[in-house]
Image (cartoon, coloured by chain):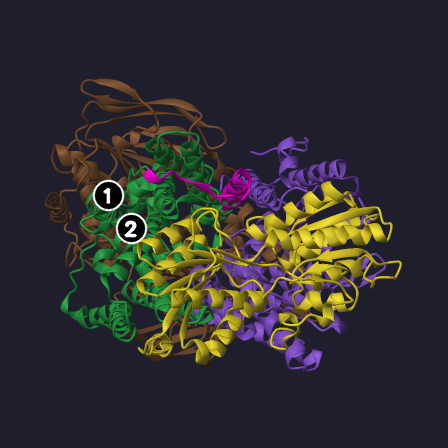
Chain colours: A purple, B brown, C yellow, D green
């Protein structure tokens, strides 16, 4: 049967670290063509760019891990940001009240998604496409598709720094940490992954599948709301196009970060962070070397394709069995 | 006799249209393994599901340690120290062993899951079951046998007094089966009540102390295992009249060779498989689970790749080598997992049966790709009658059929195609005794009409009641060949081989 | 229970479809179909409101009552083509369209011609068909006036300009004209050299990230051209992130030219952050459109191309300009 | 639409008749409501129920219907194709460039067909032979193709010769050519899908790929054919849309269009779980989606309300479909 192999196999090394290698090469390329790219400033602005999307992607990861999807996160972010901005600048309400109502509202939108997908069992993609349109429509209705700017007092909150680091980077890393703990160290997180493995087995194991899946959508909505706060603070205003196609960027981040669309797979940290940084490196890098924005969509497509291709090859390689004691166990040919 | 630790008294349960359990009473005491046997639909799993809290009985009482208890949910059962090891294992492939065991009962510390305690407790349970892999290992990386151990481990987590095993050995190799029996014996010594549901009567005799037989929802007798023989139990299971057809086997005249397999191998899976199959002959491919029989079958029809060897099939009057991807035209393959690889559940009986033969059910030349529905319906009727599949209409959805009828639909699919060779992998598994007899009769008829059939089964009586010749496989290669006069002992010994004697 | 939810959901759908209909009155009015390509910023809403307001004002004198049928194409050229076709089927009297893609609006112009409906291109001229008339502001002249004024400003202050150019969405004809004017004035007057060209797709996040990266990549940059100031707060945020957000006169100040003087641009110019810009007329263009329509309705001769030129604005004179939609409380917050 | 849904004819015994009526009622409810609303609209909204408007709605639906048919083939297999808009735009641009360079329009049209078909083939190979996830592969292909389209044209649409457009937009018996093309295509596919064994293979692979593979159905080729077919439909739609816009523009390839295509198929009754749905469903869905914006335009409903109503309608149709289907296959 299988001997214990310790020889260094390029194949295994490539699959686990191959991706970081590609990322490194991309960074080297950008730094060569635009020297100022290789600087602390650039690194900070990469994380700064990724901050709102990292938060939204971490919420979306929970839904994807239950083998479903939510393409309305962009519109949830837009509607909650629009209402928050309206409350602050048009109605002059206190800022804390606006922030709280933004979060409550984004949860309610998550509840609506959960209701359509989990209770009425509409196909997740179609249901959240419907809510994507509806939320965008309501947002435009309330703002009459005008630009709603935040008052000067809080407009510059978005790019305050502590030393070289932007506050919203710290905030988003903090949120990612909490989401990672929820994912790996709470029953809710573990049951989300179990549902992603197999819904019928999950129910057999006593998991209240409907309730957990519903709650995953609410969490996803909430994260979209939090992401919206960072997004509007950075830009200082909410425009009719804010949040458009955030969902596809977030999904690209998750895929590159190893969260599989087949559910039950992937991590918040380091997974989502790696995915976010990769996309942000590409966008910022292209910005630094002055390439046109349309090259970015082309390159992003290529990166998703390559990471998917590597992932499909990876599933063919069977990892070794971790053994408690040192005695070799006979690994029979289980499929 | 000490008072029985567990007593189920006058249990009755009826589902719409069927009386599943009629007034069943039985007792089991600590430190004893009680075998619960009976044909499919006799009420075994219903009875145990009552004890496990999944089903509410219409009437009857359950006493534990002399006190009456009410069990209305799995958590009630667990609270009363009852653990249920299901047949289909509830495994979560991408998660760790510890997660799978604790998925709905994680212990918390400071608001987070306390993995330190979990791993520590898991190691204790796994050690007790003689497993040496780490609780952090992912389920998809361990063998089905080890997964069965994890399933049992989950049951043992809350140190139950009563443990119900529902056909645990159906996907275990002989080594793993022995390992499981040792664990059950240690649990017996520790004083737990063990209830062991099984089809394999040889297991009942080698493992259990007492046996109880259920037939049509009633107790049909029981007592110490030593007081009964195999035939007695079968008689109780299926009643007087059907006993004789159970063993009768008709002789088949073997014609000339129609398939010759030479040196098929796939590294690490099957190696150097060579045999030949003759017209009108039924060859039993016998061996323990995991010995590579299914892998040989799948290799022959091109479902799994091979690294070398040739397959030649009789065309006209000489043997022509055939590419692995082409063999499908000449071989009808009936796989072991009916629901995943055998049926199109939401589609009609007619569509299911014509699936393999569509290209021949078409209209004349200009419309050669259009299906001739009259022809399709008539072909379906022909084989439905021939195999007497009980259906209300051809358009009935296959998912509404019984297991036996579903298997007949699959066989009917290949009968329509009428290939010279059939491969049947566990054709009678999970069917009731009546359906098993029907399938065996169909196999014999096919052989009589000149088809060459390769049958794989892990039930010794099944394979012996159809095969003319046996090929015994162990660890991926053919180790022995026997004529029709082979005895059960020869087969079991060569299959388990020196291994069973050494341990 | 689920079936009841479904039925109620369906009733909501039916009611919302029926409730949305305002049975159109039949008395004699001039039906004008206004086809917007998208609603990206407040200026488009301003155009629409001023059109309807000015037409209402003139109703007693001209005796023409207008009925406005408005549709939006959500940035999809094919959808705009369909929307205009729907207008044609409604037998509207005039079609006014702001083209999503001046290369494909020709198809709608042709369809309107066949239906005998006059077609007026608004704000974006067509490059693929000959409309009945065009009303708008000369984007190229607007950008030229800003660039030339900016060059003069830099020369007067003896500044050797190293500028960052924040371009609009190059699909949009206006953005292309502004980039062309900026590059030409750079060559002709040589008051600055463009050290970074940042495409933004008219998206505020791209304005912010683009400006931030460009400012960090070119720390010595001392001037900037912002194609449109409709979301100027994002540029200001970028400036404050690199501590260069200061009014003229302050050493940290960067010289900024920004077109349109939208509400946010107006506020920044008042605070002295933006040094020069040319207005993107809202009120006067809508007035020009209604005047042209009135001439057409009365059969009087009308100009084929009606262009308004923007007014140069600087922190000094911006508060004195009237008819500036940015000062209208309805649009500014 | 269960009769049209899959080739299965439904003979229900008496015991099931109550339940069948129940399914019948919920499944056809949306289409009944549609007819009621259609009637209400034609009364309230002038010029709606005119030949010219209805014809123009069908003309507007033509390219969406063809795209929805291509998407239906992939959905029946339980897959998805998000790359149709980008693939269509790229095909149209290559064809237009060839025509601009003096090439003869027929060859240009063939290029517009073959380029998308080839890109569809790439999708098919990655899904069937490399086992990659359809959602992600086509998402990447969409980003790549729309990126390429905008880079090649650097945003300027390429006008197409008059004779090409006029040829495509000629009216036969008052009915524009694209509508006739869709009609013929749908009838042919409806026949092919329900009556030939290729169609049966498509359904069996969509219902259970492993069973089909064991029973000798060439499942890998079926998946490959479905994705290439989707690409081909993208090509056909490219020809029609280019001829209607008189130019090939990267504008056609916007991401949002992909969701409209999938919504059309789903609203029409093609199940996204696989195994159910035909060309007719896709076309009906496309008509419904186009009708929504047409009715809203005719009734001068605000753009914001249109978005909300469109969202609600899509969810309602699919919800009823999912629940009636779930009940009948319980």
Q: Is residue B156 visible?
A: no
* Image location (x, y in percent) of residue A158: 74, 65
Q: Chain of mark 2?
A: B
Is B267 inside the magenta-drawn segment? no
Q: Position of residue D268 (x, y in %)?
A: 31, 59
Instruction: Give the total number of marks visible in the rendering.
Output: 2
Residue under the image location 31 percent in, 57 percent down: C115
Q: Which mark is residue B355?
A: 1
The picture places residue B343, in percent across and down from the top left corner, at 29, 49
Q: Judging from the image, what secondary structure is the residue with disc 1 in? A: helix
Q: Secondary structure at mark 2?
A: loop
Circles 1, 2 touching at the beta carbon (< 8 Å): yes
Residue furthest toward the right?
C251
The chain to which mark 1 is attached is B
What residue occupies the far top of the structure in this picture?
B318
Magenta residue span:
D141-164
Work out whether disc 1 and disc 2 sit on a shared chain: yes
Residue B344, numbered label: 2
Left or right? Give the position of A201 relative to B225. right
**Picture layout, residue A4 above or below residue C250:** above
């Amino acid at each position: 049967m299988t001997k214990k192999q310790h020889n260094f196999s390029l194949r295994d090394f490539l699959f686990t670290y191959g991706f970081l290698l590609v990322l490194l090469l991309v960074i080297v390329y950008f730094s060569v063509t635009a020297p100022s790219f290789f600087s602390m400033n650039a690194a900070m602005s990469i994380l700064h760019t990724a901050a709102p999307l990292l938060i939204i992607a971490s919420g979306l990861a929970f839904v994807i891990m239950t083998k479903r999807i939510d393409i309305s996160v962009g519109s949830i972010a837009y509607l909650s940001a629009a209402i928050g901005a309206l409350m602050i600048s048009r109605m002059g309400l206190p800022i804390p009240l606006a922030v709280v109502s933004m979060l409550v509202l984004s949860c309610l939108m998550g509840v609506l998604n959960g209701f359509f997908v989990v209770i009425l069992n509409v196909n997740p993609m179609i249901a959240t496409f419907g809510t994507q349109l509806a939320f965008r429509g309501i947002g435009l209705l309330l703002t009459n598709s005008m630009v709603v700017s935040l008052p000067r007092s809080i407009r510059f909150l978005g790019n305050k720094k502590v030393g070289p680091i932007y506050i919203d980077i710290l905030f988003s890393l903090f949120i990612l940490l909490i989401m990672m703990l929820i994912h790996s160290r709470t029953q809710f997180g573990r049951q989300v992954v179990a549902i992603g493995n197999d819904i019928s087995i999950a129910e057999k194991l006593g998991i209240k599948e409907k309730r957990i899946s519903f709650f995953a959508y609410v969490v996803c909505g909430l994260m979209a709301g939090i992401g919206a706060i960072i997004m509007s603070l950075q830009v200082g205003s909410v425009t009719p196009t804010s949040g458009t196609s955030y969902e596809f960027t977030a999904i690209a981040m998750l895929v590159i970060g190893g969260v599989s669309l087949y559910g039950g797979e992937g991590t918040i940290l380091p997974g989502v962070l790696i995915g976010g940084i990769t996309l942000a490196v590409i966008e910022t890098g292209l910005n630094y070397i002055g390439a046109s924005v349309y090259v970015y969509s082309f390159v992003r497509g290529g990166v998703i394709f390559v990471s998917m291709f590597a992932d499909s090859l990876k599933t063919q390689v069977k990892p070794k069995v971790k053994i408690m004691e040192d005695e070799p166990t006979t690994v029979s040919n289980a499929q | 006799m000490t008072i029985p630790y567990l007593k189920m008294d006058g249990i009755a349960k009826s589902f719409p249209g069927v009386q599943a359990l009629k007034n069943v009473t039985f007792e089991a005491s600590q430190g004893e393994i009680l075998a619960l046997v009976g044909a499919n639909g006799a009420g075994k799993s219903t009875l145990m599901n009552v004890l496990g809290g999944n089903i509410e009985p219409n009437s009857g009482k359950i006493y534990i340690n002399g006190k009456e208890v009410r069990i209305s949910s799995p958590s009630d059962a667990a609270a009363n120290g009852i653990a249920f090891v299901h047949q289909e294992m509830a495994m979560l492939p991408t998660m760790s062993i510890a997660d799978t065991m604790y998925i709905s009962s994680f212990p918390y510390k400071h608001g987070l899951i306390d993995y330190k305690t979990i791993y520590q407790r898991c190691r204790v349970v796994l050690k007790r079951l003689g497993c040496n892999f780490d609780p952090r290992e992912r389920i998809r990386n361990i063998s089905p046998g080890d997964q069965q151990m994890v399933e049992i481990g989950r049951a043992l987590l809350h140190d139950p007094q009563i443990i119900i095993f529902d056909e645990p050995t159906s996907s275990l190799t002989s080594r793993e089966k022995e390992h499981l029996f040792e664990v059950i014996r240690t649990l017996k010594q520790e004083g737990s009540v063990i209830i062991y549901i099984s089809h394999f009567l040889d297991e009942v005799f080698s493992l259990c102390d007492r046996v109880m037989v259920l037939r049509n929802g009633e107790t049909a007798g029981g007592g110490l295992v030593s007081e009964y023989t195999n035939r007695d139990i079968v008689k109780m299971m299926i009643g007087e009249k059907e006993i004789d057809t159970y063993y009768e086997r008709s002789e088949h005249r073997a014609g000339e060779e129609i398939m010759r397999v030479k040196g098929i191998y796939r590294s690490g899976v099957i190696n150097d498989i060579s045999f030949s199959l003759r017209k009108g002959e039924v060859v039993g491919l016998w061996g323990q689970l995991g010995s590579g029989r299914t892998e040989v079958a799948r290799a022959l029809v091109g479902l799994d790749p091979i690294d070398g060897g040739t397959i030649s099939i009789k065309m006209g009057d000489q043997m022509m080598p055939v590419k692995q991807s082409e063999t499908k035209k000449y071989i009808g393959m009936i796989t072991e997992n009916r629901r995943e690889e055998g049926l199109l559940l939401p589609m009609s009986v007619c569509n299911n049966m014509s699936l393999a033969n569509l290209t021949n059910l078409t209209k004349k030349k200009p419309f050669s790709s259009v299906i001739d529905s009259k022809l399709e319906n008539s072909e379906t009727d022909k084989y439905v009658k021939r195999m007497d599949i009980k259906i209300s209409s051809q358009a009935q959805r296959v998912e509404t059929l019984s297991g036996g009828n579903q298997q007949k639909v699959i066989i009917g699919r290949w009968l329509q195609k009428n290939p010279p060779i059939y491969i049947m992998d566990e054709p009678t598994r999970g069917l009731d005794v009546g359906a098993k007899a029907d399938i065996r009769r169909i196999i014999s008829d096919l052989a009589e009409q000149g088809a060459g059939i390769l049958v794989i089964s892990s039930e010794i009586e099944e394979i012996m009641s159809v095969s003319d010749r046996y090929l015994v496989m162990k660890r991926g290669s053919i180790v022995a060949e026997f004529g029709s006069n082979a005895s059960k002992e020869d087969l079991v010994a060569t299959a388990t081989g020196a291994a069973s004697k050494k341990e | 229970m689920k079936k009841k939810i479904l039925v109620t959901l369906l009733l909501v759908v039916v009611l919302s479809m029926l409730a949305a209909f305002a049975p159109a009155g039949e008395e004699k009015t001039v039906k004008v179909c206004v086809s917007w390509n998208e609603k990206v910023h407040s200026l488009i809403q301003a155009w629409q409101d001023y059109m309807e307001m000015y037409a209402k004002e003139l109703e007693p004198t001209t005796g023409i009552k207008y009925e406005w049928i408005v549709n939006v194409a959500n940035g999809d050229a094919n959808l705009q083509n369909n929307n205009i076709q729907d207008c044609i089927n409604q037998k509207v009297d005039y079609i006014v369209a702001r083209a999503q893609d001046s290369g494909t609006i020709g198809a709608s112009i042709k369809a309107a011609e066949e239906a005998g409906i006059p077609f007026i291109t608004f704000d974006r001229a067509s490059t693929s068909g000959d409309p009945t008339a065009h009303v708008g502001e000369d984007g190229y002249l607007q950008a030229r006036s800003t660039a030339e004024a900016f060059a003069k400003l830099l020369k007067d202050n003896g500044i050797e300009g190293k500028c960052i150019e924040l371009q609009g969405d190059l699909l949009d004809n206006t953005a292309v004209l502004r980039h062309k004017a900026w590059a030409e004035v750079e060559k002709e007057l040589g008051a600055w050299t463009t050290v970074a060209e940042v495409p933004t797709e008219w998206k505020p996040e791209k304005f912010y990230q683009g400006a931030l990266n460009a400012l960090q990549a070119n720390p010595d940059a001392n001037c900037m051209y912002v194609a449109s100031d409709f979301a100027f707060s994002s540029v200001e945020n970028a400036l404050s992130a690199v501590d260069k957000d200061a009014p003229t006169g302050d050493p940290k100040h960067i010289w900024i030219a920004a077109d349109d003087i939208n509400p946010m641009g107006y506020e920044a110019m008042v605070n002295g952050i933006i040094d020069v810009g040319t207005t993107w007329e809202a009120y006067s263009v809508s007035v020009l459109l209604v005047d042209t329509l009135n001439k057409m309705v009365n059969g009087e001769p009308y100009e084929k191309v009606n262009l308004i030129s923007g007014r140069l604005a600087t922190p000094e004179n911006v508060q004195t300009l009237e008819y500036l939609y940015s000062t209208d409380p309805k649009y500014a917050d | 639409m269960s009769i049209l849904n899959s080739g299965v004819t439904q003979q229900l015994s008496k015991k099931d008749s109550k339940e069948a009526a129940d399914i019948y009622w919920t499944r056809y409810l949306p289409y009944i409501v549609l007819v009621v609303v259609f009637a209400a609209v034609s009364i309230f909204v002038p010029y709606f129920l005119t030949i010219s408007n209805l014809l123009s709605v069908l003309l507007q639906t033509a390219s969406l219907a063809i795209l929805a048919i291509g998407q239906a083939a992939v959905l029946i297999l339980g897959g998805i194709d998000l790359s149709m808009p980008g693939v269509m735009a790229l095909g149209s641009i290559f064809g237009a460039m060839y025509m601009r360079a003096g090439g003869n329009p027929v060859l240009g049209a063939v290029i517009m067909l073959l380029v998308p078909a080839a890109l569809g083939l790439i999708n098919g190979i990655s899904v069937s032979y490399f086992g990659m996830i359809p959602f992600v592969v086509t998402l990447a292909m969409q980003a790549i193709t729309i990126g390429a389209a905008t880079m090649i044209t650097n945003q300027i649409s390429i006008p197409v010769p008059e004779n090409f457009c006029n040829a495509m937009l000629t009216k036969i018996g008052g009915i524009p050519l694209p509508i006739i093309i869709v009609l013929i295509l749908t009838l042919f596919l409806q026949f092919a899908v329900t009556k030939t064994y290729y169609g049966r293979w498509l359904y069996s692979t969509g219902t259970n790929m492993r069973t089909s593979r064991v029973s000798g159905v060439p499942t890998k080729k079926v998946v490959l054919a479905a994705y290439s077919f989707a690409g081909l439909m993208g090509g056909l739609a490219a020809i029609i849309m280019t001829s209607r816009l008189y130019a090939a523009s990267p504008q056609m390839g916007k991401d949002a269009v992909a969701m409209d295509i999938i919504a059309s198929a789903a609203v029409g009754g093609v199940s996204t779980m696989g195994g159910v749905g035909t060309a007719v469903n896709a076309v009906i869905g496309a008509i419904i989606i186009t009708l929504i914006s047409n009715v809203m335009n005719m009734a001068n409903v605000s753009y914001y309300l249109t978005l909300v109503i469109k969202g609600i309608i899509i969810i309602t149709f699919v919800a009823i479909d999912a629940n009636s289907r779930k009940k009948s296959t319980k």
